[in-house]
Image (cartoon, rainbow, N blue to C red):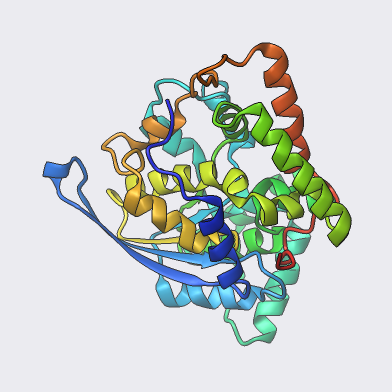
């Protein structure tokens, strides 16, 4: 199975260059029961991983918009049960959504970072309660203590690459959720396994090899990591499947929520709405089912991929995705 709509590379590159300083985009989600969709929702996209983004701007934006759900471009693999870690077949959408929907405190990267953000917000005149709305003080302290048992202080470039958002952005959205009656947060990016499997079966090995050559050269010439270089040279490969998945998820959320804020990577504030409008899969009554399927092994008119070719593809994909030298919180240089 292949996608019915694909935003071309030149279009992606144009969108990303046009919104280097970040962007806010509004989309109205509508659909009648006769069309298989009963939607009546506002969807606002905030591009939050560009240089010098101040967390106070995100917090104040959420205060102004007052969403009833916040979607973060964070991969959900770590929280998924075994049934969903390698999704690619029939998906129980209700159960799946329940797993990727989390209270804000579950998204705290670590409590020291959240405390730092609290202090910064208070310096800007933001009023914060010591205990989140609707939560008893002792119960909240116990929850924080549970977070401290597992929190990670080594978050860095690899974390940012995996999720396209910095820990500061994630922590700010989580803190806002806790301060406003535990507004649910959705871990809204495509699971990593599904992304890699479907990307492997969407592109020919020769095309991936050609892309790899360009990315490696760009990485060397601009002195940036492979991931950052790939976002310049082939944003369609890096972001296309995520955009289609997130559009499908947003269409599904539009059936049960009325005011949705999506915090995503730069450029995707404009590319995701393209899939919302033009992708039949993202707009089908069972959109999550459509994008969660494993695509058939890639083949062209000459031959079908064999295991050796698939291994070669995966090696290239891993190089593009997990270059620890990349700086995803900084806008890549213009080509």
Q: In the image, what residue occupies the spot 46% across and 64% down? A: 45
Q: Describe residue 23's horizontal placement relative to residue 206 as left or right.
A: left
State the image coordinates of residue 43 (x, y, percent, origin top left): 37, 62
Decide if residue 182 is in sight here: no
Front residue of 309/261: it is 309
Front residue of 238/215: it is 215
Q: In the image, what residue occupies the spot 74% across and 67% down? A: 333
Q: Describe residue 114's horizontal placement relative to residue 91 as left or right.
A: right
State the image coordinates of residue 281 (x, y, percent, origin top left): 34, 38
State the image coordinates of residue 243 (x, y, percent, origin top left): 49, 48
List the single residue furthest toward the front: 302
State the image coordinates of residue 59 (x, y, percent, origin top left): 56, 73
Q: Quadrant of the N terminus?
A: top left
Q: Quadrant of the C terminus?
A: bottom right
All told, the count of numbered labels is 0
Question: Residue 51 occupies which quadrant of the picture?
Answer: bottom right
Establish if 125 lies above or below 269.
below
Front residue of 262/208: it is 208
Question: Residue 112 occupies which quadrant of the picture?
Answer: bottom right
List the single residue furthest toward the left: 34
Question: Residue 207 occupies which quadrant of the picture?
Answer: top right
């Amino acid at each position: 199975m292949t996608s019915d709509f694909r935003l071309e590379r030149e279009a992606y590159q144009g969108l990303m260059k046009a919104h280097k300083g970040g962007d806010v985009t509004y989309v109205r989600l509508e659909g009648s029961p006769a069309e298989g969709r009963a939607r009546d929702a506002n969807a606002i996209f905030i591009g939050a991983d560009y240089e010098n983004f101040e967390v106070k701007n995100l917090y104040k934006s959420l205060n102004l918009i007052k969403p009833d759900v916040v979607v973060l471009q964070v991969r959900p693999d770590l929280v998924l049960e075994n049934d969903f870690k390698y999704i690619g077949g029939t998906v129980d959408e209700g159960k799946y959504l329940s797993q990727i929907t989390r209270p804000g405190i579950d998204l705290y990267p670590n409590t020291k970072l959240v405390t730092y953000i609290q202090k910064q917000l208070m310096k800007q005149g933001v009023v914060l309660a010591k205990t989140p709305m609707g939560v008893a003080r002792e119960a909240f302290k116990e929850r924080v203590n549970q977070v401290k048992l597992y929190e990670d202080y080594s978050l860095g470039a690899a974390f940012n690459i995996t999720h396209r958002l910095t820990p500061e952005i994630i922590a700010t959205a989580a803190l806002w959720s806790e301060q406003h009656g535990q507004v649910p947060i959705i871990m809204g990016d495509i699971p990593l396994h599904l992304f890699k499997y479907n990307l492997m079966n969407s592109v020919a090995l020769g095309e991936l090899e050609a892309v790899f050559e360009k990315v490696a050269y760009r990485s060397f010439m601009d002195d940036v990591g492979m991931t950052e270089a790939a976002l310049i040279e082939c944003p369609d490969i890096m972001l296309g499947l995520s955009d289609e998945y997130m559009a499908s998820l947003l269409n599904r959320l539009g059936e049960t929520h009325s005011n949705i804020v999506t915090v995503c990577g730069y450029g995707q504030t404009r590319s995701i709405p393209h899939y919302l409008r033009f992708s039949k899969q993202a707009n089908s009554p069972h959109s999550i089912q459509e994008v969660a399927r494993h695509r058939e092994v890639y083949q062209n008119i000459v031959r079908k991929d064999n295991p050796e070719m698939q291994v070669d593809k995966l090696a290239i994909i891993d190089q593009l995705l997990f270059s620890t030298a990349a700086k995803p919180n900084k806008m890549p240089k213009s080509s």
